[in-house]
Image (cartoon, rainbow, N blue to C red):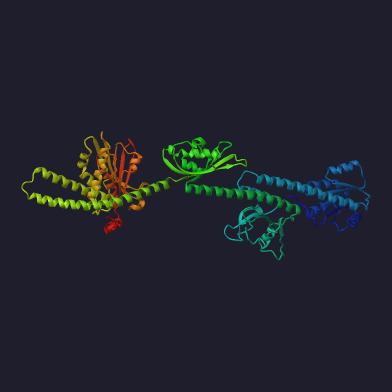
Amino acid sequence: MLDHKSASQKPHVLIIDDDANIRLLMREALTTDIYTISEADTGAAGLDQIKAQQPDLVLLDLKIAGSNGYEVCAEISRRYRDADISIVMLAAHEDPESIEKAYRLGATDFISKPINWDTFPYRIQYLINARNAILETKKNKLHLEYMEHISRIITQNKNKEVIMRETMLAMLDIFSADRAILIKPHETIENEYVVDCEITNNSAENIKGPASPVAETFDKNILLRAAHSEYPVVSRYGSSDPDQVSDNAPNQQMVSALHLKYTQNWYLIIQQHVLQENWTITDVETFYKISLRLTNMLSLHLLTEEISRTENLLKQLQKIGHLGNWHWSAVSNYLTWSDEVYRIYEYQRDSYFPDINQYFAIEFQEDAFRLSLFDEIKNKSRHSYLIEHRIRTPDNNIKWLREQCAGTYDKKGELLEVNGIVQDITDAYNRKQLEVHDNKMDAIGQLTSGLAHDFGNLMTVAKGNLELLEAAISKQQCINSENRELLADARAAVNDSVELTRQLLAFSRKESISPAYLNIKQTVNKFKNLFQNTLGDRVSMSINIDESLPDIYVNPSQFESSLLNILINARNAMPDGGAVEINAGIMTATPSQEMNQHDNNFANRYICLSIKDTGAGMSDDVLKRAIEPFFTTQINRGSGLGLSMVYGFLKQSGGELTIKSQPEKGTTVCMQFPMCDVNVLENTETGAIQ
């Protein structure tokens, strides 16, 4: 920074002349009220004075005892070229060559002897004023260059930390400061501040930095004063200053409040710990301009941060709620998606560009109404709509979505754009469907239970009467074989009805069972021949059961009957032959979404016994009704109670039944049982299975 005097200091004039009378006349003409005056009678003494005091103006005689005025002028110019010392040469003659030589060696002006003492003071005052004006111009130019440099730094495409560091480093140079500090409000503690950025020069490395913004280098009111002042507040401290806070206080400091938008004031501070010239009004103005530029930069930075936080929060909320948004411009016909919409539709942002025609393409005929609703918005006959529809993802998965959108129109009623939100409600839809299914099965179970009990009571009466009738007839000698066959048929029908009642009670989970430990591998191997005979010669059977599979706690007879019913269904699905796989093992994944998890004893592990066939498979409609009592696809064959009995058995056993099937791709029936831990056994023994 330029070295200059404060406006309150008197100009310093040095007189170098070997004539004591001349020096006295000059002192009296200039007066000490206006100037600080020093004298030297030789060139060497004058150079020593300049080195010690660095005057503003030197009155130098051309002919000095022991030296040449030209040589002294040249030496002053050489040594103090950057100090802007005005040199006025005094000579007894005024010839062009002498004047030209004096100016060439660095003289500012030339005064001829004898001196006109009436005009002499005004001549010196004019030279001093001209010097100060030149210095001020140079200083303003230099500060303008500094401001351009600061502006370039602030407008660079860099992050805030780099900009602040480079700006504060430049400020140390501009203001000959030892430390520059930026402080901001504490996030949680009121009226407390923390250091956001701090830069020191090499000479200030041993200066202890402030531990907190309310540091010992600040007086207690300086931030308050700065907050209520448009311009920076300058504080100067001295060894005798009673307000000096500590030995660590700076020689002087300047504080400016940065009135940022969207937050409390931040404060920019520069400190000078090593004694320097006092900061001038120009310095204060430059600091003020820098503060304004930093205020704009930091306000924009904070706004960008807030927008970024809001966008990230929105994205997070959209991801949590499976909710995305889209925008379509009626002018450009351009469609844009948020990240969550890409995630819902299972497309990659970098490799897929949404198209409005493809977006509203009819995937399912039942959802064609959605396109007509969008067309009504485009035709201005409707302004918004809310609809639930399905989509098919690139992996051929089906999802259910809830979509709501609204049009935006100009003053003439012309459509400008359509904005919509899309929410993935697949899980909620599946849960709702499962709840409806469970409620339906519960209702059917209650109805079935009532019918089974009443039907069972009737069959008990019928069975008892048949037994009495058979006993009475057996005493008669004339009963023929035809009558005996009629009795046998009636007894078989009653027994079949009793078995039907048992199956109905098993479905409704009302039948009492007697659970026991059962080893799946041993049981399957025990009935292996029976199972193969049931399947027939045209169906192959393979068994793969884990040797270390633990026992399950179920009713053995119902387990065997359930397994046999599933194999019979598999055989019926493969009239032309096929294959059946029986697999059993421990599953460590959480039960699938198809399982009603609030109605079982599963933790993270469960035992799964699966029967997979290569038969005709089932359509979605058939699969949805597969476990309903009396539902069957076999015309004039079967009662339709096989899978419903299996379902009731597994529910009673604390397990789950899941069925996966596709037309022409076979069916997999999974019987899933809880692990036999202590808690399950305790619940079982106290009557959990009834």
- From the top left corner, tell me how far across and down residue 53 is, in percent: 79, 55
Vertically, is 248 above or below 648?
Answer: below
Q: Residue at x 15, y 52 (%)?
A: 465
Q: Residue at x 76, y 48 (%)?
A: 140
**Looking at the image, which residue sits at the far top?**
576
Left or right? Give the position of 561 relative to 198. Answer: left
- From the top left corner, tell me how far across and down residue 345 is, in percent: 47, 40
Q: Would you say residue 401 is visible in this rendering?
A: yes
352 or 562: nearer the viewer: 562
- From the top left corner, tell me how far across and down residue 611 is, in percent: 28, 42
**Looking at the image, which residue sits at the far left?**
477
Q: Would you say residue 269 is visible in this rendering?
A: no
Classify the position of the C terminus by image quarter.
bottom left
- From the top left corner, tell me how far across and down residue 525 is, in percent: 22, 44
207 or 409: nearer the viewer: 409
Left or right? Give the position of 241 relative to 116. Answer: left
The count of marks equals 0
**Looking at the image, which residue sits at the far bottom?**
242
The quarter holding residue 622 reads top left
12 or 39: nearer the viewer: 12
Left or right? Give the position of 660 relative to 279. Answer: left
407 or 197: nearer the viewer: 407
